Amino acid sequence: MWYSPYSRDDRNGPNPLGILLTVILAPIAATIIQLAISRTREFAADAGSARLTGNPRALASALQRLESAAQQAPLHGNPAFEPLLITNAFSGQLFSNLFSSHPSTEARVAALRKLEQLQYSARS
């Protein structure tokens, strides 16, 4: 229907509206998927670090301190460098989770605290 090479009567050729929508929407969808994978990897890296150190609370505290420092001295640079940072220094409020390369610090801290509770309950 969207990108069919021919119409029903096979005389009109490709559907230009379908091609236009595909050209516009496909890169946006690919970017959203790529950013979602990046956020998932951040959670996995946090969990791996917590298992390696054995102290999820210390990692959560370090993330909170980094976030606090980033808020006190915001970066005024190129937002293209955001994937290289630990926290979301450039993100705005609108669509912050959808178009962000990192999960929010609050979400990361909550995941680390949950991991800490799981470790504590496993020891008991």
Image (cartoon, rainbow, N blue to C red):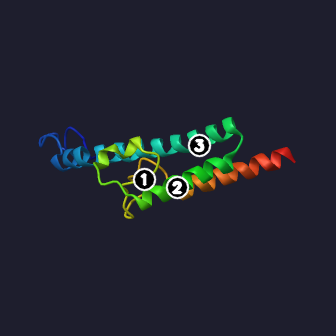
Q: Position of residue 112 (x, y in %)?
A: 64, 50
- Determine whether the residue tagged by mark 3 lies in a helix, strand or loop: helix
**Location of residue 110 by image quarter:** bottom right
The residue under label 1 is 88
Which residue lies most toward the top here? 52
Per the rendering, the mark at residue 46 is 3
C-alpha span from label 1 to label 2:
8 Å
Answer left or right for 115 relative to 82: right
Label count reads 3
Q: Which comes sooner in the sequence, label 3 or label 1? A: 3
Asked if residue 104 can be seen in this view, the reply is no
Tell me: residue 58, above or below residue 95.
above
Q: Position of residue 114 (x, y in %)?
A: 69, 53
Q: Amino acid at mark 2?
A: Thr
Is the C-beta separation of discs 1 and 2 under 8 Å? yes
Taking the view exactly as shown, the residue that stands out farthest to the left is: 12
Residue to which mark 2 is pinned: 105
* Towards the viewer: 77 or 37: 77
Q: Alpha carbon of mark 2 to alpha carbon of mark 3: how far? A: 11 Å
Residue drawn at (79%, 49%) of the image: 120
Residue type, label 3: Asp
Q: Residue at x 22, y 44 (%)?
A: 23
